[in-house]
Image (cartoon, rainbow, N blue to C red):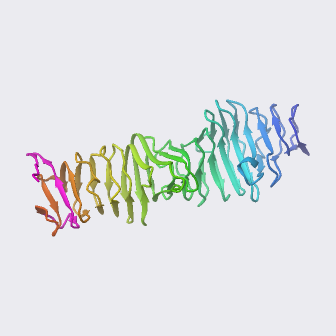
Amino acid sequence: MFLKLFKDAESVIAGSDANLIVQGLTTLAGANTYGGVTTVGVDGTPNIYLKIRSDKALGSPAEGVILYGGGSSYDAESQVQLDVDGIVVKDETLTLAGTGYRAGLHYPHNSGAATWAGDIILDGAAGFITADRDGGTLIVGGSSANTITGNTANFSVRGWGRVVLNSTLNIGNLTFARDDMGVALVNSTNNTWGVTKLAQGTLELGANDALPVATTLNIGKGASKADAIFDLNGKSQRIAALKDEHNTTIGGGIQKILGVAPSTLIVSNDSASTFGLVGSSIEGEVTLVKSGAGVLTLTSTNTTYGSFVVSNGTMVVSATGSFGNNSTNVVVAGGTLTLKSSAAIADTATLSIADGAILNLDTGVNESVAYLLINGAPKRASTYGAIGSGAVVIDNTHFSGSGVLTVLRDTSGTLIILR
């Protein structure tokens, strides 16, 4: 049996074999008991909305909900809306379907919260999870036992509100996108997706390695001016590469990596990666660890109080880049740290270089640090460099290039340079 609705249902819908078809702006508010599938929308027909105002509105969860996408633009999307503060829809599977159009789960209000405590299947061209308005929260997943799966060509977390992702995501190589000025909090782990595209708003971690460790984190919106913040939130995250982008013609916008509590970002890139466009910075208490065999280049001034650590590959601080004055612990545990600026490291910093690691100082660089440790042993205040640098202490094992490192202090006192 099929029941087709074009407007609000004013009575209870029952029947174990009843299937509900929604093809207009429809509200379900009753404690319905029907047992069939709920089908919302017509593929390619825009702005068909199902508003849910009761935990029991969708009847038996056995057959789930299928939402077909509407138009191809943001204002033509067909939606399932959790339309009441406090509503919790349990055990329903929502399939976002369609062959070229937008289908989305929404919380449309500017306060309160609603929860979809069921699975989501991406089976169309464009699937969206959206908390539309600032102050509102959409919670997806009652726990990590709920899943978001599928192979849609576009998955995006949108809106100006807060989206909390408790569900485990397994969407293969599809891009995970965060857009609009809201917040997406990822609480689950063991997630699988391709590139993480943080175009706008805030992407916040609720657990260590909430993002897939093989993902490339791309921060910024190349097509327009936007503010994008990756908030580690006191957690540790490993990624395969770090990149930033914004529209330099329009100008403005920020690309920020933030940790309000001690946090660690491990970049294990095996190919070249760059972070540091105008407006890009690492702030708060973030420690950045360079792993992987590739080159990571930092091209802007950072303000983090955390450490910078090279464990493998090469980290380059460009002529315009700097770890910043707040970071006072720089470690080259392996690989190479290349400095192309004399202001890359704070004068108050301690620099540690392990055996097998190299500090490469570019031509004309005279970098100053407070203390130097080589393989854990403190060194005297002096100048250090490779052969041909003109430094007092020549060390071709730990230094390369023609630049000089000036060590200002040791346990005996302070180096005073007369010019």
Left or right of residue 70: residue 342? left
User: Quadrant of residue 201 in the image?
Assistant: top right
Residue at 33% x, 52% y: name it: 322
Q: Evaluate whether residue 371 shows in this view.
A: yes
Asked if residue 175 is among those painted magenta in the image, a careful observer would answer no
Left or right of residue 250: residue 384? left
Q: Residue furthest bottom?
A: 388
Q: Evaluate whether residue 269 shows in this view.
A: no
Q: Residue furthest left?
A: 412
Asked if residue 404 is among those painted magenta in the image, a careful observer would answer yes
Relative to 353, residue 329 above or below = above
Residue 356's spot in the image, x, y percent?
24, 64
Residue 48's spot in the image, x, y percent?
81, 45
Residue at 43% x, 62% y: name it: 273
The magenta-colored residue range is 394-419
Q: Nearer the viewer, residue 47 or 153?
A: 47
Residue 68's spot in the image, x, y percent?
78, 51
Left or right of residue 82: residue 407? left
Residue at 73% x, 47% y: name it: 75
Q: Nearer the viewer, residue 348 or 63?
A: 348
Q: How many marks?
A: 0
User: Quadrant of residue 137 in the image?
Assistant: top right
Q: Nearer the viewer, residue 144 or 159?
A: 159
Left or right of residue 135: residue 414? left
Residue 175's spot in the image, x, y percent?
59, 57
